[in-house]
Amino acid sequence: MQALPAKEEAIALLRTMQLIRAFEEQVRTLFASGLIPGLVHLCAGQEAVAVGICSQLRSSDKIASNHRGHGHCLAKGADVRRLMAEIMGRRPGYGLGRGGSLHVFDAANGNLGTNGIVGGGIPLAAGAALSAKRNGRSDAAVCFFGDGALNQGLLFETMNMAAIWKLPVIFVCEHNGYGEFTASDDVTAGGDATARGTVFDIPSDKVDGMDVLAVREAARRAAARARNGEGPSFLVCATYRFGGHHVGDKQGYKIAAEAMAWRRKDPIERLSHQLLDAKVVTSEMLAKLVQTVEAEVRDAVEFARAAPVPDPHDLELHLHA
Amino acid sequence: MPDDRTITYRAAVLEALFNEMRRDPNVILIGEDVGAAGGVFKQTEGLYMEFGAERVIDTPISEAGAFGMTVGAAMTGQRPVFEVMFGDFITLVMDQLVNQAAKVNYMSAGQFSVPLVLRTAVGIGANLGPQHSQSLHAWIAHIPGLKVVLPATPADAKGLMTAAIRDDNPVIFLEDRMLYNMRGKVPLSEHFVSIGSAEVKRPGDDVSIIATSRMVRVALAAAELLADNNISAEVIDPRSLVPLDVDTLVASVKKTSRAVVVDGGYKQYGVTGEIAATIAEAAFDWLDAPVIRHGAANVPIPFSKSLESLVLPDAQKLAASVAELLRGSR
């Protein structure tokens, strides 16, 4: 088990995970009430990966996210109001409400976008790493992808080039056991997913993705490698999505006992108990923390609901730079 | 221009690359065999010697990943020129091109732009067979957010490559490999041709022949043959498909009242259909005859010369079809 970080950082880790959970719960409610159209993919259960990784990044470091990306956006510093506005299709959103949940970009915080194509963000992060290396910066780039992307050719192509060119990129697999509605074990050869990195001589580690401190430590090592010019790393973070592939997925393919077992590993509960046991926080402080993030999310919902939708004028705006 | 010299189309593109790489350290070249090898058509020769491996980057044969990385590099400050060796291989980068590069500026509301050039060699006529001969630019021109450029002369090749590299959008730059040895006058100094500006390559009064890329040369030869028969053909080169200089095309058709469109891509659902429809919408009342289209035959491009030579119109066939159009509508 990892030693607890300093009080301030430990609380920040917990707070960001709680913010993501509260955000996703609100999104689920808004979707059910028809205020969010289309499709949304929630990351409740997977918060420790986004938060642990991003805790070791600075704003000039880049991330490329995926379809289950609200947590990555928030962990990288996104404004809660603007994120909610984008997901609700409102004009103050990051893309004027024209991208939605699957296409949230946040340049100020180094977010190259959530992505609607499984594996699509992987080479984008490597390209950002190439830029960082060319410009002599010590920035790193991270791509987040699920186990559903383990069989996309883009992953292998990008890993190969990242390895030969020693690019400062961190490949982060959020291994939640399912690619959409199919158990990844049923469709994935090669055993342990880390083998996909070691075949390219990329240092590849299995990480407990339900333990934010374990993820944070793995990210610290990978980021140091990247910043020191030692090349890419691959982290396979075992995690679980508490919900389905998207909101509304009935999840008939999941086994109840499996879901229950993972619920008991809830990363927020885990860190909360660690902090209580170490007397870093009191239960009153925890309750207050939850209230604070829930209020922040409610404020974002109110902001977004009151916000205008895009103008007809926005239809062709930004078609070209 | 005072400092014109006669150089090849290949050398003209290369000159633009040298100039822009000297001018802007963020311009980099990425592709297969572009480095020490100097390119499979010698189209990058010398760049590696001057700019080194850091700016002239040889990739593995891994088009999707390499182009995806190029998009990421363009989003983060580089101005890459990515080379797809044969235009047919553009299929391998299609997702990164269509779903990422074309849409990033729009989806991010301008937070990220994608200033890259994808250059590729196309063109029927070198016995390269069904998977190395196609001009698939109609697929690309279909996608909002991309610009599509296809120079027909050495001077345009230099001027449009300069413009493409300085453009803040993804620009697809199609070079007809059968033009690489074509010679023409090209300014020695900086030369910039605005993307979206058509050019009248030969003025005329009786018919407008709108031709792209190598078909411009065919159209000019056809115009010579027609002149012998007292038919005055105007030849117009759009030079870019997106944006399309509709005004120049329509002004010509309003003058001549007849239009023939010629392009090296497949005829079915192709560039010629789009241009013909655009003319019909804008100038129907001025037309004295239907708009005629010529494109590549709707077949996989055959290897054997006896069949390959039938795929595209030559000057004789084109001139005959224009003369036929005139006979029916004069």
Image: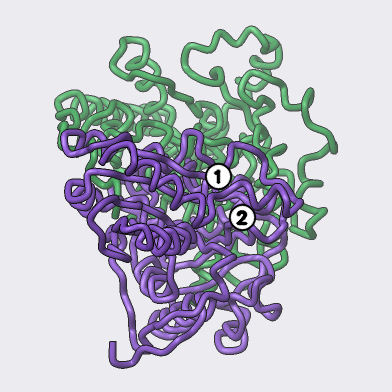
Chain colours: A green, B purple
Quadrant placement of the C terminus of chain A: bottom left
Residue that badge 1 annotates: B296
Q: Give the residue type that dot 2 points to.
A: Ile
Q: Are marks 2 and 1 in contact (CB under 8 Å)?
A: yes
Residue that badge 2 annotates: B124
Quadrant placement of the N terminus of chain A: top right
Residue B298 as seen in the image, left or right of residue B155: right
Look at the image and tell me whether residue A73 can be seen: no
Q: Secondary structure at mark 1?
A: strand
Q: Secondary structure at mark 2?
A: loop
Whichever of callouts 2 and 1 sits on the residue coming sooner in the sequence is 2
Which disc, if any, is residue A194? none
Look at the image and tell me whether residue A210 can be seen: yes
Horizontal and vertical percent position of residue A119: 59, 41
Chain letter, disc 2 residue: B
Q: Residue furthest right?
A: A190
Horizontal and vertical percent position of residue A296: 27, 32
Horizontal and vertical percent position of residue B134: 60, 49
Q: A125 and B318: which one is in front?
A: B318
Q: How far apart, in angstroms, are the residues tagged by discs 2 and 1?
A: 9 Å
Res B5 → quadrant: bottom left
Q: Residue furthest front?
A: B229
